[in-house]
Image: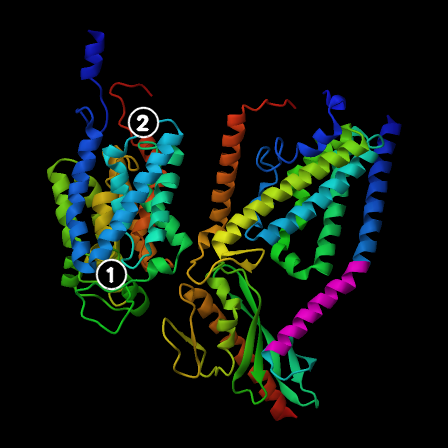
Amino acid sequence: MNNKILKMVIVLTVTGIFSGGILATVYRVAEPRIEENRLKELKEAIFIVLPDTVDYKEIERNGTVLYMGLDKEGNTTGYAFVSEGPGFQGKIRMMVGLNKDLKHLTGMKVLEQVETPGLGNRIAEEDFQNQFKGLQFEPEIEYVKNKKPEKPNEIQAITGATISSRAVARAITKDVKRVVKILKEEGSGS
Amino acid sequence: MAAKELPLSKDFFKGFWKENPVTVQLLGLCPTLAVTNTAINGFAMGMATTFVVVSASTLVSIIKRLVPRQVRIATYIVIIASFVTMADLFLAAQFPAISKALGPYVPLIVVNCLILGRSEAYASKHPVHRAFLDALGMGLGFTWVLVLLGIIREVLGFGSIFSLKMFGDWFTPWIVMILPPGAFFTLGIIVGVINYITGKEGSETTCH
Amino acid sequence: MAEAKKDILVVSSSPHLRREENIPKIMHNVIVALVPAMAASLYFFGLRAILLILTSVLSCLATEYVFQKARGKEITLADGSAIITGILLALTLPPSFPLWATAIGGISAMALGKHIFGGLGYNIFNPALVGRAFLQAAFPVTITTWTPPLTMASVDTVTTATPLALMKFEGKITPYLDLFFGNISGSLGETSALAILIGGLYLRYKGIINWRQPLSYLLSILLFGGLFWLISPSRYPDPLFHILAGGAMLGAFFMVTDYVTTPVTPLGQWIFGIGGGFLVIIIRLFGGLPEGVMYSILLMNAITPLLNRYTRPKVFGELE
């Protein structure tokens, strides 16, 4: 009887130890690669939203992480930040570029989204993302439907996916203002 | 069970058609329906599952005499979970794009009843080489159905196969095919067609 | 003797069908009743309307034939039910809808909406609406691209919004007369309230439909639409608009009255109509889509078996 219980304990323990040990080893090998992938993705996104950027510096201001883009000579090309907002079905995460005068956007790239395939997920397409190059965000980013945007702060919403398009416009408007405020405070402070 | 008398090839091939995990046993439907919106996703999920089912079945068959009956399920699950975690880490490290597309469905392979089913029903009662062949057949049988589903849904829903564009601009994608209902329609039709074919053959039913 | 008595004293809920072979007769009357709506679509949208209707009807007939042949059943194309499904499906489509996609709609209407369940009489959902729902899910952009009617004098626009979309997204109200006669953009058959009304009255006159089903549906739309209108007249349109715009009329007279997919008991029919009307208003005012008739009827279809079960009249003298 006792033997049986002892055997069970031993088998489970040994299995657990083996499994834990092997997983720890695999994790140690895989972890740097995964981290590398994550950084590479981040870097690529920053370089896309900030033109002429070859390097970046990470800065943190009261909990907000900003990426300051640098060109070949080490001059500031602008600021990139991650913007988040609720979409049609889930969270939309985007990398957004802001020019160094803090006047207009320089680009946008969707990092994560779970919008409806074929409709809402077209926010991740080039055509839609390119609309954010040079887009002004004062007083706020607006969207128009089924026609070409006329004002400098307008984007054209995706046909059939107004909600996703609006979600992007709102999230960026909200976050860009916060970032601009932080950067302006810093500018006047120093 | 007269399994000993069956030729080895039967162990391997039964998973492809006669006892196909998806179309006949209807096991592992969660990944089948959830990630097959493109052919490549279906293939990646099939391969990951094959890796796990083969590794788990082989190991279970090796240690089958050492494990007491009372804790066998717990042991199997620990083994399966370990292999799943390995597959997950491997995908994240080597194929970040696929890992992102499959999302939580890779860790969820743990609860794919196909895998525990093979360990419990087959590997724990058969010698290692048979368990290996059985699992490999099941895994590949699972994979081909997922790839087929993925191809049908990708062609109709995106107008492409393995991301290669198939049609010109005249093609309007059927968005419903890449949404969950499309998965149900397609799987239903595939199972229906296969039942229709096997029904015509007048299949002999195997007992388990 | 006992058998004869049993025949006389059967107590059942409506419809009380006494004639033999009544399905073709009913169906042919329904087709006649749909003629005004089809004529209106021809008048407003031209030959394109007839092409769409033909494609839809032919694809429905072909699908029915294939399924009945494959299952070794009697071929019942002549009973007209497939033709009605085809016409109704076409009437819910925008005039510029591609013909090939219309055919897919017809196939899915018959296959997914009817024959998967076992054919006429066994289907849970209105087949035409199943086809329309499939198309809505498959081609959400194409199916909401509307062209203005030929009679509307606007040369510069290729596409227009429907009155419901105008109301929902831009807060514009379309004049009642245009809504009533059909001089608006929209689906083939839901533009002219007048044409559908004529067809509906004909069906009532012939005794094919009862007054309860369309009336409860429309009254419920009036009631709930009116309720929101009273709460805030500036934000919500008035109830008459709700009835005249979109597919409310078509739904009320030709889909809520479907024999197979709606309750058979009077109480069940009231509940069906009122629930459906409520859903229309909720979807139109608060949903993501401008129009809610399709989903309101499909959702009510789903609870029809339940309604039939719980509203069955008690057998007289039965003990608890």
Q: Is residue C35 above or below residue C226?
A: above
Q: Position of residue B203 (x, y in %)?
A: 57, 24
- Distance (Cα) linking label 2 and label 1: 52 Å
Residue A145, quarter of the rendered image: bottom left
> Dot 1: within a 10 Å radius of its alpha carbon, few (fewer than 14), some, or many (20 or more) residues?
some
- Residues in magenta? A29-48
Q: Are marks 2 and 1 on the same chain?
A: yes
Secondary structure, mark 1, is helix
Q: Are marks 2 and 1 in contact (CB under 8 Å)?
A: no
Query: At 77% from the left edge and 42% from the top edge, which residue is drawn?
Result: B55
Q: Position of residue B133 (x, y in %)?
A: 74, 35
- From the viewer's side, name the closer residue of A132 and A138: A132
Residue matched to label 2? C74
Question: Residue A124 colored magenta?
Answer: no
Residue C265, quarter of the rendered image: top left
Q: Which label lies toward us, 2 or 1?
A: 2
Asked if residue A189 lies left or right of residue A166, the reply is right
Q: Position of residue C192 (x, y in %)?
A: 18, 56
Query: At 31% from the left edge and 42% from the top edge, which residue is drawn?
Result: C60
Q: Position of residue A123 (x, y in %)?
A: 50, 67
Residue matched to label 1? C229
Look at label 2 and name its amino acid.
Answer: Glu
